[in-house]
Amino acid sequence: MPSKKALSLTAMAAALALGLTACGSDGGGGSGSDDPLQFGYIFPETGDLSFLGPPQITAARYAMQEINDAGGVLGQELPEILTGDEAGDAAQAGDAADRLIGQDVDAVLGAAASGMTMAIIDRITDAEVVQCSGSNTAPNLSTYEDGGYYFRTAPSDLLQGPVLAETIVGDGHQTVAVAYRADDYGEGLANATVEALEASGAEVVAQESYDPNGTNFDAVVQAVANSEPDAVVLVSFEEGVQVMTGLIEEGIGADQMYSADGMNDETLAEKVDPNDPGTVSGFKGTAPGVDNPEFEEGLTEFDPELEVFQYAPQVYDCAIAIALAAESAGSTDPAVFVEDMPAITSGDQECTAFAECRDLLADGQTIDYQGASGPLDFDENGDVTVASIMIYSYDDEGTHAPLDFVQTTP
């Protein structure tokens, strides 16, 4: 994390305070080390990314069940997870964070959107509460001053951008226009993609930002269309549907368009043209994703109504990693167990399930947790160092399907 020395002093001070008060609380938002580990989440229950809410919420609850079925953390069952809605709104996400901290949460899962995390990260990490997101990809989060309390199991867009660029160039495109939302997510992924496109010999003929909260996107549509590209990248969330339909009206086909995780939506065809799902045929994109049918089967058994799985493995891994760090540290105090977050992903003994990993720790072994989303190996910035990127597309029926999974490292 940014300052390991400062973090160590924080943990030492917290440990001293705990020694002086039998089971008192720490100075931050977390509960005392003798209390059960309390999770909370801040996910998009409403808003532009609400389609990402169900898989992330389900994955969090699935992890809670697995942990409790194994006897809980440090012999205590996990309480019901505390909830919060980021709603695509910084003020609402901030209110959710304040409420969780006020309820003595020890760890927060989320937010889903990088911009929403930027709106709440200071509140959470300043309270010495561990935060772990399974879907934040903005590059600037790698070096953000978080006191060492922020982690993510989704890869930085510095890893996704080159895969997206390689997909575009591999399809034979050489002149590319990029339209992106003017926020942390949009700027980070757009810049990473442009850099990789140019390194591959492609020409970026337009790089246009837009206000994601706008209601009219004609200006960016015209700017992109006037650049006469043979491919277009849309770094967008739900508002990208309006940009996409505008470009189609300008004569640019869906098979010339590419996007990323923000538009990785199985209902995209219906949103673009409910009368002709084939309108989106050939549309491609990339998103952090893994080929793990065993995990998806287990998640489906847990929630048979779940249809979307995006970022579910990553959120599950956040929860399991936090629980294992508490086991490793012998404490549910986040100021103490945060020190063990990197350690449980870089030890000697590989393990994949909470109970298996916990038992190895109890035997005095060091563990290397291999997550549902792959090996984590948290680095000094709380980032994963290995990423699996899915390439997806839509067919003539408007059906979404993965084409390939690419393993990538910095």
Image (cartoon, rainbow, N blue to C red):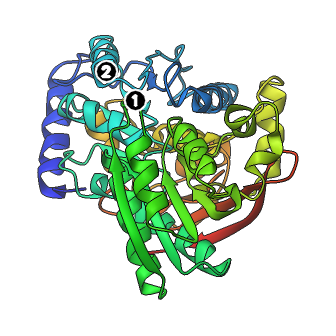
State the separation of the CA atoms marked 1 and 2: 8 Å
- 269 in relation to 288, above or below: above
Residue displayed at 45% across by 58% down: 224
Quadrant in the picture for residue 245? top right
Quarter of the image holding residue 241? top right
- Could you say which is closer to the camera, residue 268 or residue 227? 227
Classify mark 2: residues with Cα within 10 Å, few (<14), some (14-19) or many (20+): many
Near-viewer residue (142 or 24):
142
Residue 404 vs residue 181: left or right?
right
Which residue is rendered at x = 41% and y = 23% of the image? Answer: 86
Q: Position of residue 18 (x, y in %)?
A: 21, 26
Q: Which mark is residue 108?
A: 1
Q: Secondary structure at mark 1?
A: strand
Query: From the viewer's perspective, is residue 96 above or below residue 3?
Result: above
For disc 2, the marked residue is 97
Return the mark for residue 161.
none
Give the amino acid type for the residue marked by disc 2 in the picture: Ala
Q: Nearer the viewer, residue 288 or 370?
A: 288
Quick check: marks 1 and 2 in contact, CB under 8 Å?
yes
Q: Position of residue 320 (x, y in %)?
A: 55, 40
Q: Helix or strand or loop: what does disc 2 sit on?
A: helix
